[in-house]
Amino acid sequence: MKRKSFKLHLFALLLTGFTFTSCEEDEPKTSNIVDVATSNSQFSTLTAALTKAELVSALQGTGPFTVFAPNNDAFTKAGITSLSGLTKEALTPILTSHVLAGKVKAADVKSGSATTLNETNNIYLSVNSTGVYINGNIKVISTDLDASNGVVHVIDNVIVPPSKNLVEIAIGNPNFSELVSLVTAADPSVAAALTAASQNGLTVFAPTNAAFTELYKTTPKASLLSPANKTLLTNVLLYHVVPGRVFSTDLPNVSGEVATASTVKVKFDLSSGAKVVGKSSGASNITLANLLATNGVIHVIDKVLLP
């Protein structure tokens, strides 16, 4: 598995202390990954999807492969109760996002980016004291189902590749209309950075309209939009951006202050729910986490961060 840094130098990854339900490998396995799936009733939806996408023969190949396998409950949780409306073309990028080249046992899982067989979509693993997670919201619930050509780990949701970038998600959500209007008014470099991002992506703590309404009581919007305050507005917005993809499941591994796209750092407080703490604004609650974009991740917050 290819590991990439989140570019946050203060991260101290906890690579031990998590628990898995594991199966010991006592003797060479003769069943391939497809055999493992078809012989287990909890994977009936997955095997039907693999058949419809014409991926069965690929996973019967030499490999080795690591498959993060959604069980039937995972498909239901993802809102996929029937495959009738999904074509081969729709299923293929989803299913290949669950497969890594190479055999990665539970003990070898590390936090970071993992390259999947979907060439346009990596997944992001978080290892903390409560387990292993994918893209912040998907938990590995059972591990090390061995096969002759790899290994299967069971997950509790379906990995669906993102289709929108950070800016597109914000524009499409009416709760972010104030944020979008301020980004538009700020230095063009803010919108450009959020649209493009880097290979390692960005993390955006996005205040809701209600959060900005509260801010306007002490700092009027007209003041923020004044040409004389353009630099101030730009710095405030950049203060909500952290380099790299930082999922909620990574936060238990973060200690101390974390760099932002501004010159001022933020901190996190997990003592009573997840909070991001601004230098002069105090704590803001993360009310919705892990909105995955093609170039990063968004966490919704209820208070504007001020450097």
Image (tube, rainbow, N blue to C red):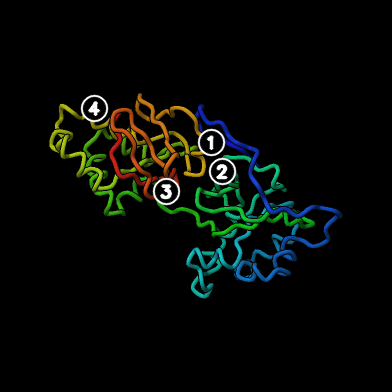
Circle nearer the N terminus (2, 4): 2
Residue under label 4:
231
Q: Distance between the residues labelled 1 and 3?
A: 16 Å
Task: Tell me the distance, in whole angstroms, between the alpha carbons under discs 3 and 2.
Answer: 14 Å
Q: Are marks 1 and 3 in contact (CB under 8 Å)?
A: no
Q: Can you identify the residue that label 3 sits on?
A: 289
Which amino acid does the dot numbered 3 rest on?
A: Ala
Nearer the observer, disc 1 or disc 3?
1
* Residue located beneath label 2 in the image: 126
How packed is label 2: few (under 14 Cα within 10 Å), some, or many (20 or more)?
many
Q: Nearer the viewer, mark 2 or mark 4?
A: 2
The residue that appears at 32% across and 49% down in the rendered structure is: 170
Ranked by sequence position, the earlier of labels 1 and 3 is 1
In the foreground, 133 or 296: 133
Question: Do the residues under discs 4 and 3 have CB atoms within 8 angstroms?
Answer: no
> Which amino acid lies under the numbered mark 2 shown in the image of this protein?
Ser
Q: Residue 207 carries which label?
A: none
Q: Which residue is drawn at 75% across and 66% down?
A: 35
Q: Image quarter for residue 269?
A: top left
Left or right, 71 with reference to 30: left
Question: Quick one: label 1 or label 2, which is nearer the N terminus?
Answer: 2
Earlier sequence position, callout 4 versus callout 3: 4
Where disc 3 sits, the SS reads strand
Circles 1, 2 touching at the beta carbon (< 8 Å): yes
Residue at image coords 21%, 38%: 185
Question: Mark 4 belongs to which amino acid?
Answer: Thr
Disc 1/disc 4 C-alpha distance (Å): 33 Å
Q: Confirm or deny contact between disc 1 and disc 4 (CB under 8 A).
A: no
